[in-house]
Image (cartoon, coloured by chain):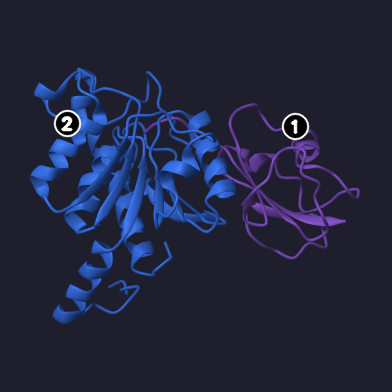
Amino acid sequence: MPYPTHPVPAPDEYAALRARLGSSRVGVIGLGGLGSNVAWMLARAGVGTLVLADHDVVDASNLERQFYFADQVGREKTAALTDNLRRITAEIRLECFQAHIDQSNISRIFEGVDVLVEAVDSARDKAMIVAAASEQLPGVPIVAASGIAGYGSPNDIITRHLMGDVWMVGDLVSEVSAEHPLFASRVAIAAGHQAHMTVRLLLGYPQA
Amino acid sequence: MQIELALFAHLTPYLPPAGADDAPGSSHARPMDLPDGTTVGQVIARLDLPAGPRIVFVNGRHAPDNHSLANGDRLAIFPPVAGG
């Protein structure tokens, strides 16, 4: 049986852990298959404040893996996700930015977050966001993802400490394409890894 | 000067061959001898890495292609792939 990587908390300690999460602030860049699912997991985990950014609107094709509903097609993702998260918990604080994130706005929008989740689609944007965050938000842990497409093994999706303040989730190689589309189940596994690594970082356990 | 070079995912095959005297180490990292003042971009050109987006860190922080490397630096290059 595998050893737990930290002691199992007693009930009163669990309350202290929830309180620690409740005072935390997490940024999520990209509210698609990864980001929308990371957001609800962090909301249910008790993270107090989410800073959410996406430039897109809900498309009918998003419903097969993203945390939106059919009657939200055409709405801005930030607005639709706000409604959905508030149905889980009215207490959560949400700061929403309907914007494309790049070097020009990342520090203004995400200054002061405890963890930053990279959840965008394109490889170019992933590289740009990690570089910009490293330069402009030094010391902020970044939980990114790469290699989540296709129907490969669920067990190939892992979390690793990549370099510096960057943790990377995925199998590192499964790029989305016509032959390797995104499946709700595998994307959700990756989102679960990102959300849980975020929780661990917030609780002071940086080991992947 | 000597740096440590780490290449990830589909870049790993571009690692230079290990020297006979190199200590056995990580499968994705290797020591690399370079002329003083070599830049990140020159290392990428010398390795003939395939085109495409890259996350490039030196000693745990992002470094642009014109960053001059110093003895003992750790250069790490990761190629993200699309999907989110």
Q: Residues within 10 Å of mark 2 (few under 14, many from 20)?
A: many
Vertical comparison of A13 with A37: above or below: below
Chain identifier, colour blue: A
Residue A172 appears anywhere in the view? no
Crowdedness near tag 1: few (<14), some (14–19) or many (≥20) residues, C-alpha within 10 Å: few
Identity of the residue drawn at 26% across and 22% down: A57
Relative depth, front residue between A150 and A61: A61
In the image, which is nearer the foreground, mark 1 or mark 2? 2
Q: At 35% from the left edge and 56% from the top edge, which residue is drawn?
A: A198
Chain letter for the residue marked with disc 1 in the picture: B
Residue A47, disc:
none
The image shows residue B17 at horizontal and vertical percentages of 76, 47
The answer to whether residue A117 is above or below residue B10 is below
Is residue A26 or residue A191 the one in the foreground? A26
Quadrant position of the C terminus of chain A in the picture: bottom left
Q: Disc 2 designates what residue?
A: A68
Query: What residue is shown at x 78% (from left), y 40% (from top)?
Result: B43
What hue represents chain B? Answer: purple
The image quarter in which residue B51 lies: top right
Between A115 and B20, the residue placed more toward the observer is A115
Residue B32 at x, y percent in the picture:
80, 52
Q: Residue at x 91, y 48 (%)?
A: B35
Q: Quadrant of the N terminus of chain A?
A: bottom left
Is residue A114 visible in the rendered image? The answer is: yes
Measure the C-alpha gap from mark 1 to mark 2.
43 Å
Answer with left or right where residue B29 lies relative to residue A170: right
- Closer to us: B7 or A121: A121
Name the amino acid type tagged 2: Tyr
Q: Specify the amino acid type for callout 1.
A: Asp
Q: Which residue is mark 1?
A: B48
